[in-house]
Image (cartoon, grey):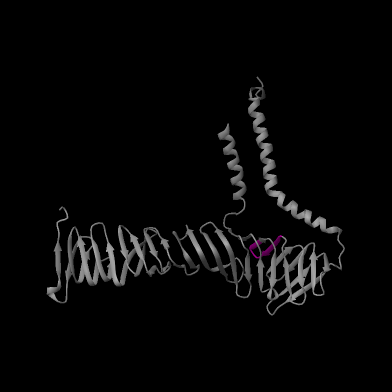
Amino acid sequence: MNYLLSLNKRLVIILSFISFFSIIVIFLFNYLPSSNFELQKIENQNETSDILKPKFSINSKKQKIFVTANEGNFLTKDEIILKKNVIFESDNFKIYADNVIFNKKTLVAKTDDKSKFVSNNSTINSNGFDIIENGNIINFKGKSLLLLK
Amino acid sequence: MIKFLLFFFIIIFNSNYAASRNAGETEVTTEDGIEVFQEEKYYLLKKNVEILSDDFDLNAQLVKIFFENDLYDMRELIANEDVSFISSAYNVNGKGDYLQFEIKTQKIHVSGIGSELKLENTEMYSDGDIRVDNLRGSFSIEGPNSSLISDNTIIISSKINGIFEMIDGKRNISIIEVEDNNIANIKTDDIDMFSKKAVYEKNKSIIELFEDVKINRGGEIITGDYGIFNTNKKSYKVSSKDTKKVKAIITNTNE
């Protein structure tokens, strides 16, 4: 007798349903947040920008933080909003973010969008940040996760 | 079938949760953000802070983590408000309003009302300060409502200092010095001792009592200036500078 015919059809159907359902659940848990984040980026593509690929640095006595983005728009005389692939990079860390408002007079950078801080063996995920005192203090806002390896 | 489904979903959700932190990693979550002070070299973790690692878990409302050169290289941790912690690496757990933990020197300081620190065989309580120097093997408990419980002995005093010795990988108390401006109390299974100062030495199996000594065992109360209790023989002797000052009261507890 064929072995497949001896299997309980009902059990096979239930197990198939569970497997399918669990794959969907795992997919939703792992990929839904990052999908939303991508969607925000795509929506911003239709806007025009004042500066293409802005690039500058925040300097202090002890470190230099290089700032790059794909687009920049002047909000006021002193404030620029940096959009798409905004990166703050120093010798010690990198911060990835989007929609960062930078004040060129006070050298303060802030965003309420999701951001990721990456340093040697440590990462911080947060809902935005403020960089103040020429980069000496970085305030990661809201629910935050710090992972030390 | 329902049990099978429940089991299946528990496995799925647990595996998803466990994937967030790998072995050897430390995961820190906060409700209200993390401030990184690069020059001062510390993190400030704010509101409902939870630290999970292989050998140390901590909950508190505000935590400062000082680091050496790189951000992951932790040197010292200071936690405030509703602090509770457990360390499997150091076999210690406790709670308090304030915790200071120096990682290299293994010094632990817990303070505040309702402070607790528990080691293998020893429990320490205080509304003041509890300090343990794990490398040197010493401890101190100081402040109101301070007490120590170890091996069926309870010590209540405003100041308790002691020394541990390691036996089979466990910290055992070898010396305790007790001091209280009012009166300190040492209780064992069948004896209640009071004095202003007391010293316990494990290798000599004695507890020495100094000033305003009172020993109470089974209705027999003896007072004097100095007392010595042999913990092996369960015998004691009380003396006084003024030989007439020693006083014994024997009551029949069966009445």
Residue at 48% across, 58% down: B86
Residue at 48% across, 67% down: B98
Q: Name the quadrant containing residue A63.
A: bottom right
Is residue B98 toward the left or the right of residue A133 in the image? left
The residue nearer to you, when weighing B211 against B166, is: B211
Residue at 62% across, 50% down: B19
**Magenta segment: does it hold A117?**
yes
Instruction: Farthest residue to the bottom: give it.
Output: A61
Query: Does B152 appear above or below A28?
Result: below
User: Is residue B202 at all visible to an observer of this figure?
Assistant: no
Count of numbered badges drawn on the protein: 0
User: Is residue A44 at all visible to an observer of this figure?
Assistant: yes
Instruction: Farthest residue to the top: give it.
Output: A1
**Magenta segment: does it hold B143?**
no
Q: Name the quadrant containing residue A87.
A: bottom right
Q: Name the quadrant containing residue B190.
A: bottom left
Q: Residue A45, position in %: x, y?
A: 84, 58
Read off the magenta span.
Answer: A114-124
The residue nearer to you, when weighing B220 against B19, is: B220
Is residue A55 toward the left or the right of residue B189 in the image? right
Q: Residue B83, position in %: x, y?
A: 49, 62
Instruction: Farthest residue to the front: give it.
Output: B255
Q: Main secondary structure of the magenta part?
A: strand
**Which quadrant holds the N terminus of chain B?**
top right
